[in-house]
Image (cartoon, rainbow, N blue to C red):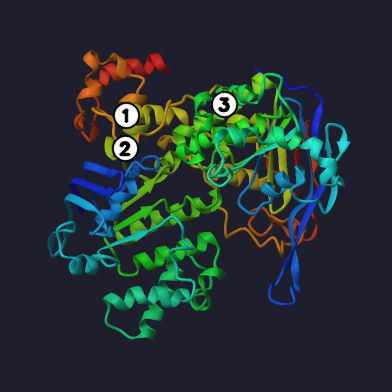
């Protein structure tokens, strides 16, 4: 199976008065049809910025983008970073779609839900408003909105948070896209509603055989829906692996620390939480060498301050498992045992 | 382990808070009543952390704010250190406020951007006319050190700090007057995962060192489980269940608690694959027009006729484990 989206050496930075903000720095990943790739990281790690670049949603006047993001369409591959704006616009909403965290501010309050969904359909299909409306009703039904014939004429404020997110999903999927980017789709929702929406995204993925990129900070959500994971820190991918490898065999000190710092609802222990000391670096003034080095517990075991001088590259440690760290896997495993 | 005494420091007895909802416009016609908190009874012991959980709109924040009298209760009693404060006015509340402090969710909007950290933390001294024995500056610097900030940063402004550090400033401010109870309203939900753990540990340490009691209001069940000794679960203004943390998380008896726990994703893919998940239908009903009988009946898979008619009372199903349900889980 070849990848549907291949991101290669993508860097995005924003020139500001204070200096160049390196939001993402030389990152590569890919996602296949029918697969869910989770991109995890804390705020400012570059997870959203990367995918906004894939969607072509950055303002070119205020952003410096380099690298490639290739969509392998049936008609042939196209690089959305170098393609002309007109062409990318044609892909948005048809070949690739995106849903956002806050479903209230991403819907227009003055138009009925039906009008907004229809607009997305009319853009890419020949047909009149009536056909668009019927198609909208079908989509609302598909995403589990009860009474779609009635609700199609209602306005966003008449829907609850979870229902609005369903509307967003209906709108994103109406043209049968092959790539869905979901940026923190359940962060604003309550847990009971979150599980409904995650289930819906999974069902829709099967239905449309889509590639899904799920951007999240919640490792529980990752465990529930993803096939593969990229862990990002300060604009770089620090570890990339299958979901089982990241949870049971995590090898980058940041991933290890992150997993150890979250309390679990299914296990009661009452011990102190493990912490990663310090805080993420400023993206204007990144530390030299490995960006995680100032917070890394294990850096002191690397001889000759290598972590402070040389940036580690993302290298393969086993099939489907890449890590960017100067320590090798056995060393990390040993240190991990000591630390726990 | 820290010690929890049998002494009750704060008690809510049949606490009720209704908000009038108006249609707006020139006549401000009254449209209805939002029953934000309806007949809520629970207590916090000295040295204990009580977690108050529920989804948005369940009334957990209103409970916290009513307990510190930011809202006047519609009815019911609040007993703080043996005194019924529910009818206290501002003037009578003032001396008590130093003992009853709050920490807020958003470390950005809860600190005055034009005040230095020093001014923010010492504001309580002014309000209550207290002069610390060691002098103000010294006292503030000790507080900053206590919450893990650099005491030399006393003259900096909030924007110079990260989210986690700001939350520490908020905590230092709450501690300035040596409170006995802190009501923390979602204190870590605006923070990143790795910073969350730091603040949770800080709250833990402070409790041990200073013998504080906490009412920890939050929606994140994993964090609540970690920090609380006892947990109160609310839904649509009412208490559904309350029990000791371990008991509640391992043996939930109310269907809502069970569904809520099963909905929380666990960071463990093998567990996730085999886990039985109860997906509740629909959304939270409007608190302006709550369902008759048990408020949870519209989403409950066990609901029967009785649930639609009769409001279940909170009762003790096993020692120190209370639920409000006609058909509890085993």
Report, in whole angstroms, how far the alpha carbon at label 3 lies from the one at label 1.
26 Å
Asked if residue B182 can be seen in this view, the reply is no
Residue B243 — which label?
none
What is the chain letter for disc 2? A
Residue A227: image quadrant is top left
Residue at 57% across, 54% down: B280
Measured as percent of width and height from the top left, residue A85 is found at 19, 66
Q: Name the foreground residue: B245 vs B1.
A: B1
Measured as percent of width and height from the top left, residue A224 is found at 42, 43
Residue hosting label 3: B144
Do callouts 2 and 3 mark residues in contact (Cβ within 8 Å)? no
Residue at 41% across, 80% down: A133
Q: Is residue B31 above or below residue A325?
A: below
Residue hosting label 1: A292
Residue hosting label 2: A234
Quadrant that contains the N terminus of chain B: top right
Asked if residue A314 can be seen in this view, the reply is yes
Q: Secondary structure at mark 3?
A: helix
Measured as percent of width and height from the top left, residue A60 is found at 23, 59
Do callouts 1 and 2 mark residues in contact (Cβ within 8 Å)? yes
Report, in whole angstroms, how far the alpha carbon at label 1 lies from the one at label 2.
8 Å
Q: Is residue A129 above or below residue A78?
A: below
Of the numbered discs 1 and 2, the one sitting upstream in the chain is 2
Q: Residues within 10 Å of mark 1 (few under 14, many from 20)?
A: many
Q: For this view, does B289 lie left or right of residue A12?
A: right
Report, in whole angstroms, how far the alpha carbon at label 2 lies from the one at label 3.
28 Å
Q: Secondary structure at mark 2?
A: loop
């Amino acid at each position: 199976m070849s990848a549907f989206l291949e991101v290669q050496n993508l860097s995005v930075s924003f020139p500001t008065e204070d200096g160049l903000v390196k939001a993402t720095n030389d990152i590569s990943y890919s996602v296949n049809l029918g697969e869910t790739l989770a991109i995890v990281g804390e705020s400012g790690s570059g997870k959203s910025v990367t995918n906004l670049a894939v969607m072509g949603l950055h303002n070119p006047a205020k952003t410096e983008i380099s690298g490639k993001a290739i969509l392998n369409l049936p008609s042939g591959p196209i690089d959305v970073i170098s393609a002309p704006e007109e062409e990318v616009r044609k892909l948005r909403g048809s070949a690739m779609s995106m849903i956002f965290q806050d479903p209230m501010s991403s819907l227009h309050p003055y138009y009925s839900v039906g009008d907004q969904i229809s607009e997305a359909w009319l853009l890419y299909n020949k047909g009149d408003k009536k056909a668009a409306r019927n198609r909208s009703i079908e989509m609302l039904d598909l995403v589990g909105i009860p009474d779609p014939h009635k609700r199609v004429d209602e306005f966003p404020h008449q829907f609850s948070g979870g229902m609005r997110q369903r509307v967003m999903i209906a709108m994103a999927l109406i043209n049968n896209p092959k790539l869905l980017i979901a940026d923190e789709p359940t962060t604003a929702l309550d847990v009971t509603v979150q599980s409904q929406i995650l289930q819906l995204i999974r069902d829709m993925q099967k239905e449309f055989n889509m590639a899904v990129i799920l951007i999240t900070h919640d490792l529980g959500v990752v465990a529930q829906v993803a096939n593969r994971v990229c862990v990002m820190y300060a604009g770089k991918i620090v570890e990339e692996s299958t979901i089982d490898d990241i949870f049971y065999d995590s090898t980058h000190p940041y991933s290890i620390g992150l997993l150890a710092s979250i309390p679990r609802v299914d296990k009661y222990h009452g011990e102190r939480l493990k912490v990663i000391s310090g805080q993420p670096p400023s993206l204007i003034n990144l530390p030299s060498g490995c960006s995680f080095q100032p917070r890394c517990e294990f850096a002191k075991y690397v001889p000759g301050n290598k972590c402070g001088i040389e940036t580690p590259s993302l290298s393969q440690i086993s099939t489907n498992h890449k890590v960017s760290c100067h320590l090798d896997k056995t060393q990390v495993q040993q240190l991990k045992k000591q630390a726990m | 382990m820290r010690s929890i005494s049998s002494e009750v420091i704060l008690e809510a007895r049949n606490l009720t808070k209704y908000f009038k909802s108006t249609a707006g416009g020139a006549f401000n016609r009254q449209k209805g009543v939002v029953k934000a908190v309806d007949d809520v009874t629970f207590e916090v012991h000295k040295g204990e952390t009580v977690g108050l959980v529920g989804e948005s709109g369940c009334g957990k924040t209103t409970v916290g704010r009513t307990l510190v009298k930011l809202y006047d209760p519609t009815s019911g009693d609040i007993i703080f250190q043996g005194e019924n404060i529910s009818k206290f006015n501002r003037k009578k509340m003032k001396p008590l406020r130093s003992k009853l402090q709050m920490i807020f969710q958003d470390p950005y909007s809860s600190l005055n951007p034009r005040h230095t950290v020093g001014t923010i933390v010492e504001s309580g001294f002014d309000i209550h006319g207290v002069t610390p024995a060691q002098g103000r500056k010294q006292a503030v610097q000790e507080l900053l050190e206590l919450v893990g900030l650099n005491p030399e940063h006393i003259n900096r402004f909030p924007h110079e700090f990260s989210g986690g550090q700001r939350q520490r400033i908020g905590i230092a401010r709450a501690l300035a007057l040596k409170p006995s109870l802190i009501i923390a309203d979602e204190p870590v939900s605006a923070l990143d995962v790795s910073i969350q753990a730091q603040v949770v540990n800080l709250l833990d340490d402070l409790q041990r060192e200073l013998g504080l009691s906490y009412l920890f209001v939050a929606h994140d069940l994993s964090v609540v489980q970690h920090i609380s000794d006892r947990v109160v679960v609310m839904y649509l203004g009412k208490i559904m269940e309350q029990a000791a943390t371990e008991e509640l998380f391992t043996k939930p008896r109310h269907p809502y608690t069970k569904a809520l726990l099963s909905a929380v994703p666990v960071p463990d893919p093998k567990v996730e694959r085999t886990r039985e998940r109860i997906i509740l239908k629909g959304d939270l009903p409007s608190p302006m027009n709550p369902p008759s009988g048990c408020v949870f009946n519209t989403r409950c898979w066990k609901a029967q006729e009785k649930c639609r008619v009769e409001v279940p009372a909170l009762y003790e199903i096993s020692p120190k484990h209370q639920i409000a349900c006609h058909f509890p889980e085993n």
